Image (spheres, coloured by chain):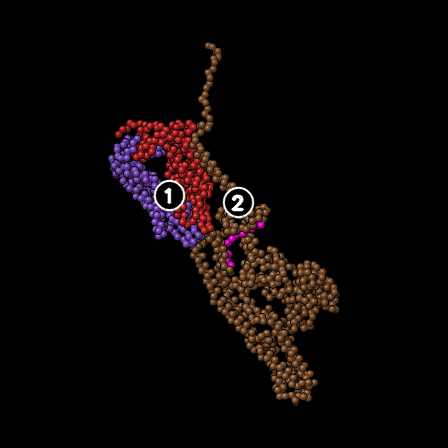
Chain colours: A red, B purple, C brown
Amino acid sequence: MNTTLDPAAYLACPHCDTLHHSKHLAATERARCARCDTLLIAPRARSFIHVIALSFTAMILMAGAIFFPFLKIDAQGFSNASSVFQAAMAFSDGLLLPLSIGVLAMIVGLPAVRFAALIYVLWPLTHGRPAYRHARTVFRLTEEMQPWAMAEIFIIGTAVALVKVAGLAHVSLGPAFWAFCALIIVTALKNSYMSSWTIWDAIATKKPI
Amino acid sequence: MGRHRHEKAYLTAHDAGLTGCRQCGKVWPKDSTQCGRCGAHLQPVSTASLQRVWACWWAGLFCYIPANAYPMLRTNMLGSESNSTIMGGVIDLVGHHNYGIALIVFVASICIPIAKFIAVAYLALVVGKDKRAGGHPHLVIYEIVEFVGRWSMVDVFVVAILSALVQLGAIASIHPGPAAAAFALSVAFTMISAQSFDPRLIWRGPKVSSPPHD
Amino acid sequence: MTDTPQPADLQTAEPTRPMWTRLSVIWVVPLFALIVVLGVAWKGYSDRGVLVEIQFEDATGLKAGETTMKYRDVTVGTVETIGFSPDLQSVRVGVRVDKDVAGYIDDDARFWLVRPEVTVQGISRLDTVLSGTFIEGWWDSNVQGDMKSVYEGLDRTPITADPSKGTQVVLRARDAGGLAEGAPVMYRGLAVGKIQNLRLDEGGSGVLIDAFINEPYNSRLTTTTRFWDASGISVSLGASGVSLNMRSLASVIQGGVEFDTLATGGSFIQNGFPYQLYADEDTAKNSIFGGEFFEPARYTLLFDDPIQGIERGTKVQFRGVEAGEVTDLSIKVDEDSQGERFARQQVVISLSPERMGLQRDTDSAIVTDFLQSEVDSGLRARIAGVGLLGQTLIVELTDVPDQPAAEMKLDAEPYPTIPTAPPATSDLADSAKGVFTRIESLPIEELLTSATRMFDSVSAVAESEGTREIPQELAGTLSEIRTLIDGLNTRGAAEKTVDAIDEVTAAANSVLEQITGLDSMISSADQAAQTFAELPMGEIGGQVDLILQDLRRMLGSEDAEKLPRALSDTLEQTAGLLRDLREGGAAQKLNDTLLATQDAAGSIAQASDRLPNLTRELERLVTQAQGLVVSYGDRSNFNAEITQTMRDLRKTIDAVGSLARMIERNPRAFITGR
């Protein structure tokens, strides 16, 4: 068909491959795919600084979630407390050990790495400096990690487990639980501020938004 | 910028002889192999990518069998140990008249994974033949599968939390069973399978049902 | 061209925006999160308890982060660290104790491990099989003194967690006998406390036992209280019959200690008060030493002559007053001046100062001083026989004339010596053969002598002038007497002995009553034996079996290897207990005891049956003789002879009677051989 199109003038929806005209959006605008409605571009005013700040928040909360007591169970005079770390290591028996490592990575490792990576990528961009070395690779990996970072799923799992245990014993929630909940909210907020197209643009053009 | 829910002809990058980056959306000439902006590998829209989908689909299915056959939880209550498989747990819950929870577990741990397998298989089978007309519903299916895929991991986390938390000596203790690992693997494989699925295939017309090699 | 300086342009710059305006409000979010997280962390840190270090012998069942510490069954802390003492001899456990109770932990705090225990009284703390070992602590509500840097954990659960709820006393016994850890302390048959911590005393010459008496029974304890070993079964024969004393099943197997306060007027006692533990109730009540234990003055006696018949517990008389007892017997080998080795009998006696006219708690040095002066004036120790028949040997401290000068050796080991004198009786060797030998030789001789003398008298009467005038009935009487005497003469010595015992026993008060008593005792012994054989052991065994099965099933055989060592110990102990109970045959032992008792009782009963004959015969004789005397009026010669006969007869009967009384006083000798 039309083979003379200039690739630089377009963007393709990653979902449905529909070509769109590339366009610089105002800070509050949002761009969606015309066919499949996937959010393509959503720059927000000072969005990078927000993402960085929220990532910091998330990392602080993550530290709390790891080190504070998570859940405590009481039943007929017996009690047992568990931290997030212990929950992940529940599979550390023998053959299930790889699963343990996987769970630990999914609920703690990958989210933490993603926050750190986002800060690494965005920090120079907010100050109008060119991106750090390997920012491109780092950000791409960050994007690829996203489905595997399951902190929010973990907290839902906690809720389900609590429902199951509720009849058996009294469960008290530790500060780590609330830290985790806050972490989920912060992560969701952060995601709403993030637009990968914008970030890619910023990395590529080395210009601040 | 309207939301066009219904079919209308759109020019895809593929049809325009270009390759769109699945990662960042940047468009590159057809023969590019790497995205110049984000460094991702550029895949041409091709049914060849379905091979990965199928491979992981089968792997996920194989893992799903032991995930159901082996116990997910080993519950030790006052000395009596019971191994509960996923289905066994549901039957137990029904036996205890906890129909609500039984339904939730049944849907979350059995229906959804199976539906996922069927959905992915359906998409993979259908995209090679179908017309563009099927595009939008297929995309919905794809989006649901991709979204739900991660959430199946909830079961594994529940097992982990229960095992770590319920350690009350001989009164009650819960240990993870081998099915937990199988289930986690199954979820992981279906996730990879769904990710490997190239949604652009959904929109590809029948006329380019074979890779457009010039 | 011209280098004329031009006015410079003003160098203007954008006003530097202050730092804070460049900062986005969004930074409040991480800041807030940081403050909250740090706040929570600080609160957790400041609220964390105080670390109490406790040393235990081993850490079986202890887990850092899991094992709890309880105070009054409320969890107040968690084990945080488990390490070793610097010398590796013990395990040092660091327990994080809640702040609000940590302040009360001072010098007097005690800690011990609570694990499942299997005793004959049952399996205790079975809950810890499930919950795991925990540390229990006890401290009072006074805050005085600081927390120690390291506490020594007790190696066993103390008798009571709260020592303020009773009184702890120390019992001193010669040996632990049948007592076991945890055995009950009884007061009139009620279990009111427990004993524990059986241990040798410093010198190894006795056993120390801690006993704890719970409130309110501890108010029964005074300085006049006496404790005795109530282990097992005892049978006593008294004026009112025979009684079988048996406390609870636990006390049969495990032993037990009973106490009673015999006299009023004693003063109340403090914790740690020492008491003597007597071998049995009678000894306790009859002992010349008080119930209160104090170190009695002890002395060594060295005898050259054999001293068979002297045993532990043999009485010591001080100038005829019971003042002590023999506590130890041994052989001491010495060398004489030529280097020849010779052996002497070493007898250790303990003396009650009170019985020698001194103060009750007189120091032994003062007692020694007193004795020293007595020895100077001729006091010697010797062995003597007492009692009607001389069959009871005692150690006598008395003035013995014509003895070479001697003095006490104060530096002798193990105790100062009191010089000895030869035995008081020449037939000591014979009498030392034992009580039964004495009974054999002495009373029968006397009986025979009396009888012979009577026979002589009767013969004299028969030969006298008035014989022909003796009515036919007297001739009959005489022939009866002759038959009696013949019978006595012709019977074998051993048989006579048995008969004597038989008859003597029978002569004890109210023969009929006694027989009734025996019967009921025998039947109760029978019943007891049956009960034992049929009921408790089988059932207990079965129950323990059931418990075991339950336990095993409960814990699941698959997990058995993973069970804490405490549990496997428990199971082993349980199995061991079972085995002991069944194979070692506690039931069998009890049965045997009861059988033996029954036998003894049976022979007494038999004896009682046969007994009246002789007594009746003798009584009739006397009556007839008296009638004779009356009928013959004042025939001088004959009358005198008859009177003599009568007197002899009376003597004989008296001798029999006092033997009977002796048996009555010391009934156990006939049953248990003690």
Residue picked out by circle 1: B153
Q: Pick the quarter of the image with the N terminus of chain A.
A: top left
Image coordinates for residue C616, horizontal then vertical, percent: 59, 80
**Both marks 2 and 1 on one chain:** no
Crowd tier of the residue under label 2, counting other residues whose Cα lies within 10 Å: few below 14, some 14–19, many 20 or above = some
Image coordinates for residue B130, horizontal then vertical, percent: 25, 38
What kind of residue is marked 2? Answer: Lys
Q: Which residue appears at 38% of the width and 33% of the height? A: A194
Image coordinates for residue B53, horizontal then vertical, percent: 32, 40
Q: Which residue appears at 65% of the width and 78% of the height? A: C651
Left-right relation of C670 to B129: right
Residue C673 visible in rendering? no
Extent of the magenta region: C108-119
Q: Which residue appears at 46% of the width and 41% of the height? A: A67
Q: Is residue A85 above or below residue C641?
A: above
Residue A178: image quadrant is top left
What kind of residue is marked 1? Answer: Met
Determine the main secondary structure of the stretch shown in magenta: strand
Residue picked out by circle 2: C99
- Tag 1, which secondary structure? loop
Chain ID, mark 1? B
C-alpha separation, residue under disc 2 versus residue under disc 1: 41 Å
